[in-house]
Image (tube, grey):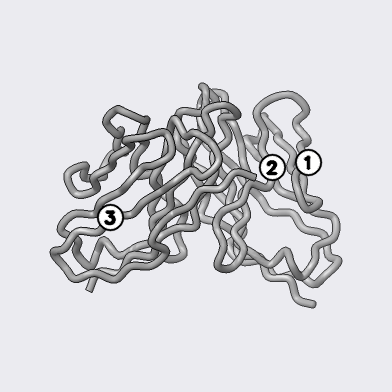
Amino acid sequence: AQSVSQHNHHVILSEAASLELGCNYSYGGTVNLFWYVQYPGQHLQLLLKYFSGDPLVKGIKGFEAEFIKSKFSFNLRKPSVQWSDTAEYFCAVRNSGGGADGLTFGKGTHLIIQP
Amino acid sequence: GAVVSQHPSRVICKSGTSVKIECRSLDFQATTMFWYRQFPKQSLMLMATSNEGSKATYEQGVEKDKFLINHASLTLSTLTVTSAHPEDSSFYICSARDGVTTEAFFGQGTRLTVV
């Protein structure tokens, strides 16, 4: 069975600080990897995804993530955060076989950006 | 981006009654829809996967007779919580997978409170 571990449950940063949120997954096969963001009162939105190819993927709002296969990791990064990045961030994994499977989510990281 | 509408956003019901939650894909056809449940401070847990016109596939530990899922069209799936009890109180989120792009989009969720 798949599992996803997000190391940081709560992160507080000041504006302009750099961000890295950790994500490790456990699965024996080939996977698709995702980061979602949930702003207060809103639905989940896709930040970025990795299916194959370049392990460094760029997403919306200046976020990027790097897939390191040997470490089973897919950490999310942003060089300079903004107050508007305050949200809940979820890492998720899916069996890569066609997308018919649902996602396995990590527990989420609550990010607070202080002005 | 694609929109998934989930209704209602909040519902309070009495113990023993049934509640129906709708999930609609507004601008794409969803061959597959997923239903998740999220407990406070926990991750989203996949409950079931439904494919249009066929029976839903439930995850281990999810009672199919309690959580009835219908996916009668390519744009609508419903989740009915039957004979609801207070322990069914939770946040339910649907996700619809675009049959063309395979990307999955999320509804805004339904907060169910059983009293």
Q: From the image, which quarter does the N terminus of chain B lie in?
A: top right
Q: Closest to the observer: A45 or B86? A: A45
**Is there a contact, CB below 8 Å, between mark 1 and mark 3?**
no
Chain of the residue under the numbered disc 3 shown in the image: B
Give the x, y percent position of residue A97: 51, 22
B32 vs A58: above or below? above
Q: Nearer the viewer, mark 3 or mark 2?
A: 3
* Element marked by disc 3: strand
**Is there a contact, CB below 8 Å, between mark 3 and mark 2?**
no
- Which residue shows up at 24% across the image and 64% down it? B87
- Inspect this view and state whether residue B39 appears: no
**Is there a contact, CB below 8 Å, between mark 1 and mark 2?**
yes
Q: Which residue is mark 3?
A: B20
Q: Closest to the observer: B84 or B77? A: B77
- Inspect this view and state whether residue A60 appears: yes
Q: Are marks 1 and 2 on the same chain?
A: yes
Q: Which residue is mark 1?
A: A58
Chain of the residue under the numbered disc 2 shown in the image: A
* Element marked by disc 1: strand
- Which residue shows up at 60% across the image and 29% down it? B101
Q: Closest to the observer: A22 or A38? A: A38
Spatial separation of the CA atoms under disc 1 and disc 2: 7 Å
Give the x, y percent position of residue A68: 71, 34
Q: Residue type at mark 3? A: Lys
Chain of the residue under the numbered disc 1 shown in the image: A
Q: Residue type at mark 2? A: Leu
Q: Which residue is mark 2?
A: A48
Give the x, y percent position of residue A69: 67, 30
The reply, left or right, for residue B38 in relation to residue B85 is right
The crowd level at tag 3 (other Cα within 10 Å; few <14, some 14-19, many 20+) is some
A28 vs A20: above or below? above
